[in-house]
Image: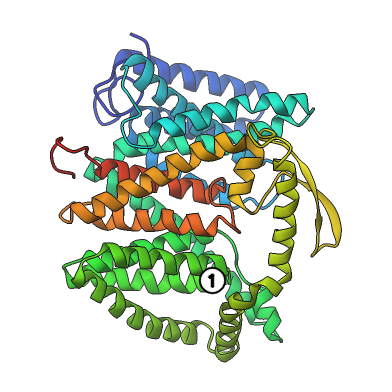
Amino acid sequence: MSVLSLNSGDGVLHGSYQNRLSPSAFMALVAIQAGLIALWITAGNILYLPMVLLAGWVLFFSLSSLTFWLPIVILGHAALFAQRTEGVSLSEYAFAAFFYLVLLLWLLDRVVVKRERLATVPGDNALALFMVLGVISVLPLLVAEGKPFQWLRELLVFFCLLFYFPLRQGIRSERVRRLVYLSFFVLALGIAAKNIYQYRSGVAIATYIWELLGGRQSANEPLFMSVVLAGVAFWMTAEKPLARLQSFLVVSFFSLSLLLTFSRGYWLGTFLGIAVMFLLGDRRERKRVLTLGAIVGVAGAVLMMVLFYDVFMALVDTIFRRLFSTATAVTDKSLTNRIVESATVWELIKKNPILGSGLGTEYSVYHLLRETTQHTFYVHNAYLYLWFKLGIIGLMMFLVAFLSKIWVGIKISLRDRTNTLRPLVLSSTAILVAMVQVSITSPQFYARDSVLIIAICWATIAAAWRPAGQGPSL
């Protein structure tokens, strides 16, 4: 029996790591380990042998069970978020090899071996077509003598959306579901704590108000926004006082983390997400949202006073300056720079509006802040990015896939208030709606952290969805 075969567990290899290994699975593990040992000895890096052996076992267990692989992948994103350079680090190569190998084998097992139909939820077919368009977009890039490696990098980011399919299967199990959400929370908590510590260290030597703003931690804002919205959803629906207390603490801490990013777009996105959940909730849940808002406002002020006692008033002043400057944002040089960028991309779109210029296409734009012309692949407006790279067809396919999940989430939230996944569906729907707004100025559809969040939100909504006539939801 081959290694990639029918299995009795939830993984790719025959059997499960929780059960006795089959002979074929055991021989596959021995072969992998022996090959890695031989490779490392030949290369003269015997000191790294323990790490290689550990990597071999992690790979094997990941192929054996989603219960093991899904949390490892989510936590492994910490290695990606830590990178702040344009190049590709060794840790990124290692994570990509691990992630895409297991994902590919899982998809082959489900589609080729088991002959399962993966497109079972509205929007899934559009997602598949979008992926096909991404692959063939290399053709116009090659015609224009672009950079194939950059095409591959951008394509692989979108391929991360396929993580949605194994996530969907895993989340249907309560045990796996708990591990998935706990892993995401730990990931967000670690980054939030790091950001607050770094900001606290920076403001300790700040002299002027502008230095408080200059020291902001504008990294991974989507993580904080998502956890805040999830916390609000649990507060709305929780029956036990302890659960509401936990939700309150989570919302308070991550609201502070989000505030310290000084990212107005994500502040507005969070308000929009809360408004969505307010509208989808019943009368009692709406009252709870209003109550939470008042309590968190006071608790947040107290938390800032404790952590930033020496610069508390200056920090509050800086936050309010940033918040109320949203009304006059058209005069903000940073936003003006993005408007110039969007205008430049729009002119390029008009040259090939149907098929686009292909992923990996580079363009030139004058950067107002740096006062120089720069060559870049990046576009702040996610809609213009998709249109520019993949044409109007690619943009429409992505929006169909994205908005379909929002629509399904709204339907579940309104018609099935007893669903055990209700708070998660509520927050997932709100997060996706918030991303629709935020993506105008801060791209959510192809940022690493946002793509992970989108995959989890889609999987949560899909796991709770049942077509009419197929019984109750989870």
In this rendering, position of residue 32 left or right of residue 12: right
Three-letter code for the amino acid on which mark 1 is drawn: Ile
**Closer-to-camera residue (301/357):** 357
Residue 189 showing in the rendered view: no
Q: Helix or strand or loop: what does disc 1 sit on?
A: helix
Residue 395 showing in the rendered view: yes
Residue 199, percent from left and from top: 60, 73
Q: Residue at x 27, y 68 (%)?
A: 235
Give the vertical position of 269 relative to 46 (above or below): below
**Closer-to-camera residue (414/19):** 414
Image quadrant in which the C terminus is located:
top left
Give the vertical position of 330 relative to 411 (above or below): below
The quarter of the picture where residue 42 lies is top right
Give the vertical position of 49 relative to 80 (above or below): above
Give the vertical position of 236 relative to 353 (above or below): below
The quarter of the picture where residue 3 lies is top left
The quarter of the picture where residue 390 lies is top right
Residue farthest to the top?
1
In this rendering, position of residue 381 left or right of residue 167: right
Circle 1 Cα neighbour tier, 10 Å, few/some/many (<14 / 14–19 / ≥20): some
Residue 404, percent from left and from top: 38, 43
Please name the residue that numbered disc 1 is placed on: 196
